[in-house]
Amino acid sequence: MAEQRWRERFSPSWLWRLPPSSGQVALTFDDGPLEGTTPSLLSELERLDIISTHFLVGERAAAAPDLVRAIRDDGHEIANHAFQHKSFLLRSAAYQRQSILRAEEAIRRSCGATSWLYRPCFGQFNVWTQGVLRRLNYTGVIWSLIAQDWIEQDDDELWQRIRVRLHEGAIIVLHDGHPTTARVIRLLPRLADEVRTRGWNFVPLTPPAVNPPGKDT
């Protein structure tokens, strides 16, 4: 938690959380889409009446355009998670720009949508990243709640990791397209009940300011 606060303090241009008294929570999913997991995830989100934000890997979006369209058609927000799932920590500005633009093109070709949100893989970025995002008219997004849902743990253990960290204004990151996604899907009813019992709502991420008239491509 201390490391998280330190990163937020020194990277204020990134979106880490929603306003703390907003009565809102943003549920986000990284790394999709994938045929073996995304349809089941979308079905459960629809059953629970949750709108979420999906940070898509460009090469996966290009390989499964029907799933990208399904995410969009279900009313979820589509966002950019680079073309390949690689850290930007040691990557040049040119590499980062190319990766983001290739993912954007894959998303656009799949469903006609243009994303204005970008999340770096592994949450890692460097001194060049913010300049790249600014020139491309993107808002960078991290998270305020991560539960390491990609590691092996039982359902109750994962739920407790989420429950004790859950807070008003949370940006929650979970994962699609992983062997552990089935466990994530099973815990969604508990998450929905907890959020609503606390009097909060699930919302997409895009703020009104993030809708520039054009993009620098």
Image (spheres, rainbow, N blue to C red):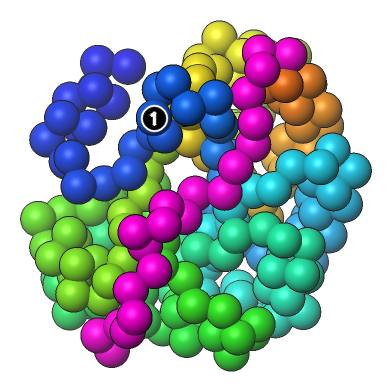
- Helix, strand or loop for disc 1: loop
Which residues, given as a range, are shown in magenta?
197-217
Left or right placement of residue 125 versus residue 206 in this view: left
Left or right placement of residue 190 versus residue 61 in this view: right
Residue under numbered circle 1: 19
Position of 173 relative to 24 (above/below): below
Position of 211 relative to 143 (above/below): below
For the C terminus, the quadrant is: bottom left
Residue 121 visible in the current orientation: no
Residue drawn at the location 55% of the way across and 38% of the way down: 26
Say whether residue 6 is magenta.
no
Left or right placement of residue 108 versus residue 180 in this view: left
What kind of residue is marked 1?
Answer: Pro
Q: Could you say where residue 43 lies in the image, as x and y percent from the top left?
A: 87, 52
For the N terminus, the quadrant is: top left
Residue drawn at the location 31% of the way across and 55% of the way down: 140
Say whether residue 204 is magenta.
yes
The front one of 89 and 136 is: 136
